[in-house]
Amino acid sequence: MTNPDHPITPTWPGLVRILFLALFLIPAAAGPALCQWCSCDLEGWSGPLIFDRDYNPKPAYTALSRELGGVGDTNRGLRSLAPARLGIGTAMRYQAAIEGGRYMATLLPQFNQVTPESALKFGEVHPHGLAWDPAGQTGYDFSRADQLIGLAAANSLQVRGHTLVWHGFLPDWVMGASRDQITPIFTNHILRVVGRFRDRKGGDGQKTVVAWDVVNEAVNNDGELRLHDEFWGKFGGAEGEPAKLEFIREMFETAHRADPEARLFLNDFDCFTNQAKLDKVLALAAWLRDNGAPIHGVGFQTHLTATDLGIGAKVGEVARTLEAMGLEMQITEMDVRFQDCQGSEETQAQVYGEVLRACLMAGNCTSFTMWGFTDNITWFEGCD
Ligand code: XIL
């Protein structure tokens, strides 16, 4: 995990870190170490998802099944219990999906929607070393994306496309590009990537790629548009907000031009636990809608912890706010980690259940997607 801006990456000043080490880690040397930013990966603790490392269902799975009216066992998959408007999704990791095995055998009966975990990201579609050309015709490598979307289509799984504009995992030639080059680079990228999969249909004759996260993580934790990283920093610092807004609006228009049928989303994290951030994300969505951008909803990553009990009330409130704005809500990357080794599999299950319940109660909640399903394959690293 190399994304320097993601909150899960430790950013503490050295002194605080040393104090933490002295207070907690050293006395705990005889026993298990505390996990600050990772999902607790020690003996006796499980990971952030709903199946364990051996693909057995956890209490979190049972909770989701029950919320959907099932009895909690895996015989009736989550997908068959969900109402028609609600996609039940998971991130799908390239290597595991291609290998198939227990990964696909567990995924297929449970989910009707998948989000390629990385295969559609800019850095994957433009592997390092392949430079951009102004006409945007070369420098693409769709080998992984094609295989993954092909696999989804063959199994009649709907796909959430993730993601078109994101500051993470960009090749050096994009980081080094000038502000003026950014719009054509991303315009070409969006037209090529979205256009490539626009007409793909599944075995059931239905459209495969139904949604795109057009812009991912555009808002900072302090409630301002993202400013300081190398990518968004190109737009002129604190004075750059109008330029950023206009760029984001244009990217939605381009995605709509590339696929007029796809549902288009803003996507961001920590919105249910950070009011300033939530306010700005909603304000951005409202601005886009009021300024003619083809935006259909807001995606909430929903990377939570097993102590986030009560979060369902906030999820419900946000769904109602979006409904009044005429927008959809999607849960796009849910997982529930044991930060600081707090909580239990039971509280983890409750947090999952609360979020799904709020989504089920909101007519405009159209996807409940988890960022993986087995603790065997999760983006959280272990505690080391
Ligand atoms: C993560 C993937 O899960 C990792 O495998 C990869 O190394 C880094 O990216 N927010 C997002 C996702 O929008 O794209 C990120 O996915 C997790 C945080």
Image: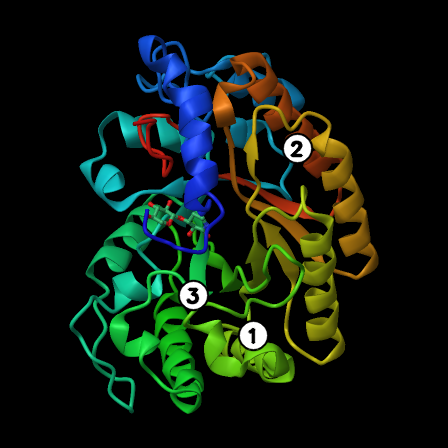
Real-space Cα separation, disc 1 to disc 2, in angstroms: 28 Å
Relative to residue 76, is residue 43 drawn left or right?
Answer: left
Q: Earlier in the sequence, mark 3 or mark 2?
A: 3
Residue found at the very far left of the displayed protein: 129
Q: Badge 1 local density, few (<14 within 10 Å), some, or many (20+)?
A: many
Q: Which residue is mark 3?
A: 167
Instruction: Using the image, determine if residue 308 lies above or below residue 171.
Output: above
Name the amino acid, label 1.
Phe
Instruction: Using the image, determine if residue 362 lies above or below residue 328.
Output: above
Between 131 and 332, the residue placed more toward the observer is 131
Observer-side mark, 3 or 1, equals 3
Quadrant assignment, res 107: top left
Name the amino acid, label 3.
His
Q: Residue at x 38, y 87 (%)?
A: 178
Relative to residue 246, is residue 213 drawn left or right?
Answer: left
Q: Residue at x 21, y 66 (%)?
A: 127
Q: Residue at x 32, y 54 (%)?
A: 149
Real-space Cα separation, disc 3 to disc 1, in angstroms: 16 Å
Relative to residue 329, is residue 33 drawn left or right?
Answer: left
Q: Badge 2 local density, few (<14 within 10 Å), some, or many (20+)?
A: many
Q: Badge 3 local density, few (<14 within 10 Å), some, or many (20+)?
A: many
Colouring mode (rainbow / by chain / secondary structure / one colour): rainbow
Real-space Cα separation, disc 3 to disc 2, in angstroms: 28 Å
Q: Residue at x 46, y 80 (%)?
A: 234
Residue 176: image location, x then y, percent: 31, 80
Label 1: state its secondary structure.
Answer: helix
Residue 94: image location, x then y, percent: 26, 46
Q: Which residue is mark 1?
A: 252
Residue 18: image location, x then y, percent: 41, 34
Name the amino acid, label 2.
Val
